[in-house]
Image (cartoon, grey):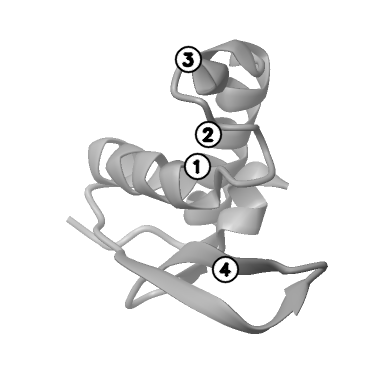
């Protein structure tokens, strides 16, 4: 099986985003997650599973803490990286 093209990966991410948008905030709220802010890690994990099931590809989960704070709130961001493309959670959640 040939690896997917970047365009196929991007389309899968867009389809994933459309699905979570259609679901609305209620499924996230059940887990005390405010979507989209604060949902990047969970969304990255879900997107990773979706890419395995749809395209048969795996990606690495990456989490980076910010070096500064915003009003006393420390923040971080999570995304996926793969060998053929970089999958940025932003595509999926923002």
Q: Disc 3 and disc 2: Cα gap in Å? A: 20 Å
Q: Is residue 89 above or below residue 21?
A: below
Q: Around disc 3, counting alpha carbons within 10 Å, would you say few (fewer than 14), some (14 to 19), or many (20 or more)?
A: few
Left or right relative to 53: residue 39: right
Q: Say which label, 1 or 4, has the lower sequence index.
A: 1
Element on which disc 2 rests: helix
Element on which disc 3 rests: loop
In depth, the one of 63 and 19 nearer the eye is 63
CB contact under 8 Å: marks 2 and 1: yes
Q: Disc 3 and disc 1: Cα gap in Å? A: 25 Å
Element on which disc 1 rests: helix
At x 43%, y 71%, the residue is 63
The residue under label 4 is 76
Left or right relative to 19: residue 37: right
CB contact under 8 Å: marks 4 and 2: no
At x 53%, y 23%, the residue is 28
The residue under label 3 is 30
Q: Around disc 2, counting alpha carbons within 10 Å, would you say few (fewer than 14), some (14 to 19), or many (20 or more)?
A: many
The residue under label 2 is 16
How many numbered marks appear?
Answer: 4
Q: Disc 4 and disc 2: Cα gap in Å? A: 22 Å
The residue under label 1 is 12
Q: Report the mark closest to the observer, 1 or 4.
A: 4
Q: Around disc 1, counting alpha carbons within 10 Å, would you say few (fewer than 14), some (14 to 19), or many (20 or more)?
A: some
At x 65%, y 33%, the residue is 35
At x 48%, y 54%, the residue is 9
Q: Give percent across and percent down for residue 3.
A: 29, 62
Q: Report the mark closest to the observer, 3 or 1.
A: 3
Residue situated furthest front in the rendering: 72
Q: Report the mark closest to the observer, 4 or 2.
A: 4
């Amino acid at each position: 099986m040939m690896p997917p093209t970047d365009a196929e990966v991007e389309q899968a991410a867009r389809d994933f985003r459309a699905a979570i948008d259609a679901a609305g905030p209620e499924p996230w709220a059940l887990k005390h997650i405010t979507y989209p802010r604060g949902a990047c890690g969970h969304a990255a994990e879900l997107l990773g599973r979706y890419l395995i099931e749809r395209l048969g590809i795996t990606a690495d989960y990456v989490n980076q803490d910010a070096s500064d704070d915003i009003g006393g709130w420390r923040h971080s961001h999570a995304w996926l990286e793969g060998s053929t493309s970089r999958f940025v959670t932003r595509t999926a959640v923002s």
